[in-house]
Amino acid sequence: MSAIFDRRSVRSFLPKAVEQYKLERILRAGFQAPSAHNRQPWEFIVISDAADLAAIAEMSPYAEMLQQAAAAIAPCVNLGQGNGIRQDTWWVQDLSAATENMLLQIVDEGLGAVWLGWYPDMVRVKAFSEHFGLPSHVLPFSVIALGYPANPPQKEDRYEPAKVHYGRY
């Protein structure tokens, strides 16, 4: 459980590439996420080209850290995989679980990351989809900027007993 308590959003990175074996373990963590009806509607785009990272940074006012990130992973939903998923809105939870699994694995790999919201901002979705040539049935859900942290993140205990209710509110 230490990764849960050690995870913090990291927005500044060292100029050091992330090893391929670490990227694969991060992706494997995403694939292990639970999903509604076990549909596993995700696909992942791994981006490490500096020009592509800079292009993504231009798509959102909150993504400037991508200019110095070693890589990014974009969890995407495949709405065309059948079984009525196009009408199914549970995929948002599915992709959230996959994104969080990857964020926790990133901590275990000694890396840092930040979760950037993409969906449902359709301006960002369209820009990303056009830049990376996504088919119309695949939508980017989030972008995870990652790399070796320039500054070790400070731990923070966020537990708030006043927000816990047993039995009833």
Image: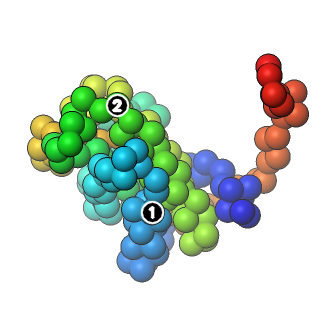
- State which quadrant residue 30 falls in: bottom left
Residue extending furthest right? Answer: 161
Residue 89 is tagged as: 2
**Label 2 with label 1: CB-CB less than 8 Å:** no
- Residue 107 in picture, x, y percent from top left: 61, 64
Give the residue pinned by disc 1. 32
Task: Say which element carries label 1.
Answer: loop
In percent of the image, x 23 and y 46: which residue is there? 78
The answer to whether residue 68 of the structure is visible from this angle is: no
On screen, residue 105 versus residue 134, left or right, reads right
Pick whichever of labels 2 and 1 is earlier in the sequence: 1
Task: Say which element carries label 2.
Answer: loop
Q: Name which residue type carries label 1.
A: Gln
Front residue of 142/154: it is 142
In percent of the image, x 28 and y 55: which residue is there? 43
Quarter placement of the C terminus? top right
In percent of the image, x 80 and y 48: which residue is there? 156
- State which quadrant residue 153 falls in: bottom right
In percent of the image, x 42 and y 69: which residue is there? 28
- State which quadrant residue 20 falls in: bottom left
Front residue of 62/37: it is 37
Q: Name which residue type carries label 2.
A: Thr
- Residue 4 in picture, x, y percent from top left: 68, 56
